[in-house]
Image: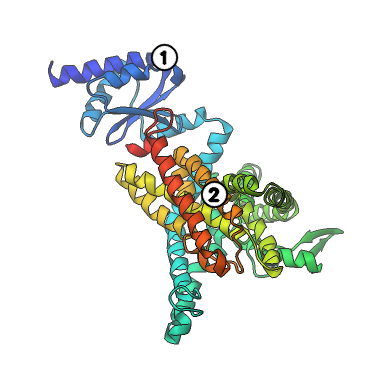
Amino acid sequence: MTKEESYLSTAQQLLELVGGKENVVSAAHCATRLRLVLKDESRANVDEILKLDLVKGQFASGGQFQIIIGSGTVDEVYKRFIQVAQLSEATKSEVKKDADQKMNPVQRLIKALSDVFVPLIPALVASGLLMGLNNVLTATGLFFPDQSLVQAFPNLADVASMINTFASAAYAFLPILIGFSATKMFGGNPYLGAVMGMIMVSGDLLNAYSYGTAVTEGTIPYWNIFGLAIEKVGYQGTVLPVLAASFILAWIEKRLHKVIPEALDNLLTPMLTILITGFLTFTVVGGIMRTAGDLLTTGLLWLHDTLGVVGGMIFGLLYAPLTLTGMHHSLLPIEIQLIAAGGSFLMGIACCNNVAQGGAALCVMLRSRDKKLKSMAGTAGVSALLGITEPAMFAVNLKLRYPFYSAMLGSALGCAYVTLTNVVNISPGAAGIIGFICVLPQCMVNCIIGVLISLVSAFVITLIMSKSSRFNKAAEE
């Protein structure tokens, strides 16, 4: 059989094995894979597809049924496939749109979060690495007894101060970055989204990290608008409130474009969009999210204090989903209060969770043959080890699904150990592989052991899952 005959035969067999042309919505290809959107993926005979000579593998991801054929060959098979299927050529973006329509609400939410955070990866990774460097310079007892490098070498003090300023900027103003990216993804003006983010971290507002203290002391500032008391509190370090505000902003802006006369559109639409979105954010979104955070925090504390090791495992299992919403920041006021009372258990939990995400991402890096994914997983994994998990979670683990589940299990195992051994931190800090520098001296060894348990178990579970046909094998390709 000639190559031409082989390409045509493969295309014809593939069409039959995926359920016929009536089951194919659209088709495109990348460098190595035939990307199909099928009406019903259950009609595809995967076992027979994998037996074809030119087929090297298959997986389904994000609503796309992807068949691995190989560089060069896939182009030729694709040409014959669209001919026999009587389809017009489609771009990868068009196929993605078709695939998005097949996703359920949860899958669409996960994809939306990924689309928002992938463009932010360089900023988050840079900040995470700088934060880790700052901690190495300022950690007491890491290199010298009862001294940090800065204390031992005072000339490094300004270097550490400068690095700390650079490291904290992206997270201090995270709502601005998210506002821009999310509003663009939702179809609104990204610059208005950035403005909304600026409003949410304005210096005129009470810093969100001081909210717990203000509640205790009864010093929360308010606006009084026609008898309505509105809290003047910022959204530093949050994710979900900014995403909600961005969605509202884009929705309002698009509606205003339709109803405001063209002559006044450029004048009134931006102003009204910001005014309405801002009002709704501070009156509705903020209140709901803070209430949800308080309820969640109370529940998690009950789990830890009442259920012991089992509670620690559940806490570790749920910490990553909690981080997805940004609600883990609601634990900060409680951590500060616990530290003031003698010590907090939250650092050990957070460290185990973060390094578990890093371990899963690093496994993806080693398993993947995709250069872009390999690079992204590597940098994101290192960032997670240093305490910054957003790149690893949103761009790698959550996108592939099974590494995220593996990291949750790894976190649960490590958190069970640090709960069993009562690891207590005496100061806040970067919750990563060097988080042990913030715990009591007698807890340091157990903190390191718990972190290593999370790191190794997340890596191993990800490796096992990546080799199982029951799970998505996208990381291997």
Image point (42%, 33%), residue name:
472
Above or below, 151 relative to 114: below
- What residue did someone put label 2 on? 182
Disc 1 crowd rating (10 Å Cα; few below 14, some 14-19, many 20+) is few
Does residue 391 appear anywhere in the picture?
no
State the quadrant of the C terminus.
top left
Image point (38%, 49%), residue name:
362
Q: For the residue marked with disc 1, what is the amino acid?
A: Glu
Total label count?
2
Of residues 3 and 309, the one nearer the viewer is 309
Disc 2 crowd rating (10 Å Cα; few below 14, some 14-19, many 20+) is many
- Considering every residue shown, the one lying at the far left of the view is 2
Does residue 424 appear anywhere in the picture?
yes
Seen in the image, is 117 located left or right of residue 246? left
Secondary element at tag 2: helix
Locate residue 396, reporting x and y percent.
Answer: 43, 45
Locate residue 279, reporting x and y percent.
Answer: 72, 55
Seen in the image, is 428 located left or right of residue 300? left
- Asked which colour scheme the image uses, the reply is rainbow
- Considering every residue shown, the one lying at the far right of the view is 227
Locate residue 437, reporting x and y percent.
Answer: 51, 68
Sequence order check, earlier mark of 1 and 2: 1
The numbered mark at residue 22 is 1
Q: For the residue marked with disc 2, what is the amino acid?
A: Ala
Seen in the image, is 223 located left or right of residue 113? right
State the quadrant of the N terminus.
top left
Locate residue 117, reporting x and y percent.
Answer: 49, 50
